[in-house]
Amino acid sequence: MKVDVVGRIESTLPADDDHPYRTGAWQPNFVEYDATELAVEGEIPDDLCGIYLRNTENPVHPSIDRLYHPFDGDGMLHMIRFRDGQAEYRNRFVRTAGFAAEQDAGHALWSGILGGPDASLRDDGWGARTRMKDASSTDVVVHAGRALTSFYQCGDLYGFDPYTLEALGPQTWNGRFPDEWGISAHTKTDPHTGEMLVFNYAKDAPYMHYGVVDDRHELVHWIDVPLPGPRLPHDMAFTDNYAILNDCPLFWDADLLAQGAHVPRFRPDLPTRFAVIPRRGTTADIRWFEAEPTYVLHWTNAYEDGDEIVLDGFFQGDPMPKSDGETDLYRRAFRGIDTHRMQTVLKRWRMNLATGTCTEEQLSDRVMEFPMVNQERAGRPYRYAYNMTTLPGWFLFDGVVKVDLETGSEERYEFGPGVFGSETPMAPRAGATDEDDGYLVTFTTDMNRDHSECLVLDASDIAAGPIARVRLPERIASGTHSCWTQLSQ
């Protein structure tokens, strides 16, 4: 392995840190590498050609109020590129404006999600909640040749060259970027049109917007999506002709919000609502559909079936689980990110545009989340979904499940005790014709051998295990959202 150290960040985290999301599998990295001639166990397929990118919460400083949440950490991009049976790796911090300010100060300046805005040391900031640091640590997509990182409570979109991870700075959209509200994580790229669909949300009316960015990085469509009050949407979906946004009945308590406290509450007396919007439609074109109360963190895919919009995603049976006598401080504090406690299962909603009705169907009994599909099927009928399973009690991915939505069959690959993976996209084989003709790619954090690898699995037979294991230069922190892009360069 040939390794060049290209950057190093000084951390002020305590040497005796005991926070489970800053230690162990979540221990952050502070060195930036370029690495080539990576050691490989097995063989990298010659027809695997593209880039796997993963964003990660990677904290540098302790929280100013000691209330660190794993979604607060600074962003770090990890990238591996495959070409001609070879692989190269890079990682870089997402140097947001907030990251730079805290580096200059030498300590945290903004409160995290568990604290209140008043705890922040600066009056400015980002986020739908306001006075947060935009860590740009949640999601990553590739749109029109740029890798774009984003923050779950809205902020800037930070651009990178996907080959080199050269920072391209916050996106401007030729002066039309909505600076006051920013853009939410989970922008959606359509491989068939080259467009990127976006949304944002905040505490001010109309509470949500929706827009379209073309393949020249220009915002070409932007509308209000009026809501009854501040909401906490996290994801969106699309079809060939429609965008789908949501109003789930889990949002900040209005009475507490009036007092400056941002405490979410689940309202089982209210329905889940879906906004179906023609992709270039107006506010007046929005149609609302109602469904069983829940919260959906991530959608799998959506498509059109005659008069119906079919929407698949992860229904939460218990969006705000009670502590139930849990004695472990951290497991109790972070039960809201434990998929087993939330009872997340794959579900399908059908919204009939002719009748205005919505029907629901559960597709699996297995607790899963963080779905991926063959991106060529995004917004269109599809057969396979690749979803992550988690270690009960913790926010750690312990395996990946391939669900055949045509037959209902499921196939799982388990990473093994003490080994945790990342969101696992599907990489189509060059010239593939079948939907699952290709590979699954993921990073793993192996606590037993104190190292990290990139695993390559055959998407048509994931239970057979990796066909290649590519060693990374350092054990990397566990992480979540990722993407795969096939590029020509």
Image (cartoon, grey):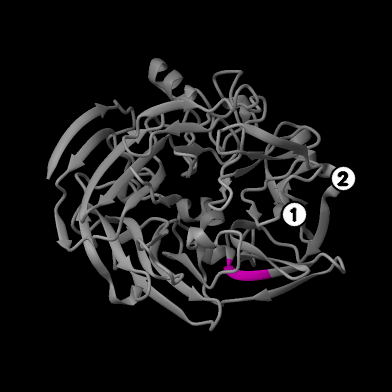
- Give above or below for 137 relative to 401: above
Q: Which residue occupies the foreground of this view, 328 or 105?
A: 105
Task: Give the residue at mark 1.
Answer: 249
Mark 1, other Cα within 10 Å: few <14 / some 14–19 / many ≥20: many
In this rendering, position of residue 352 left or right of residue 57: right
Highlighted magenta segment, given as a residue range: 343-348
Task: Give the residue at mark 2.
Answer: 284
Does residue 207 appear anywhere in the picture? no
Quarter of the image with the N terminus is top left
Q: Main secondary structure of the magenta part?
A: strand
Of pointers 1 and 2, the one earlier in the residue sequence: 1
Measured Cα–Cα span from mark 1 to mark 2? 23 Å
Circles 1 and 2: CB distance less than 8 Å?
no
Q: Which residue occupies the foreground of this view, 146 or 10?
A: 146
Q: Position of residue 105 (x, y in %)?
A: 41, 16
Amino acid type at circle 2 is Ala
Quarter of the image with the C terminus is top left
Q: Which element is circle 2 on? A: helix
Which residue does the image show at 70% across and 55% down from the upper left?
241
Amino acid type at circle 1 is Pro
- Give above or below for 97 relative to 448: above
| Number of the front mark, 1 or 2 | 2
Which residue does the image show at 60% across and 68% down from the upper left?
381
Which residue does the image show at 62% across and 48% down from the upper left?
234
Q: Position of residue 343 (x, y in %)?
A: 58, 67
Q: Which mark is residue 384?
A: none
- Give above or below for 481 relative to 59: below
Q: Which residue occupies the foreground of this view, 305 or 336?
A: 305
In this rendering, position of residue 363 left or right of residue 95: right
Q: Position of residue 125 (x, y in %)?
A: 58, 24
Which residue does the image show at 30% across and 38% down from the upper left?
91
Q: Which element is circle 1 on? A: loop
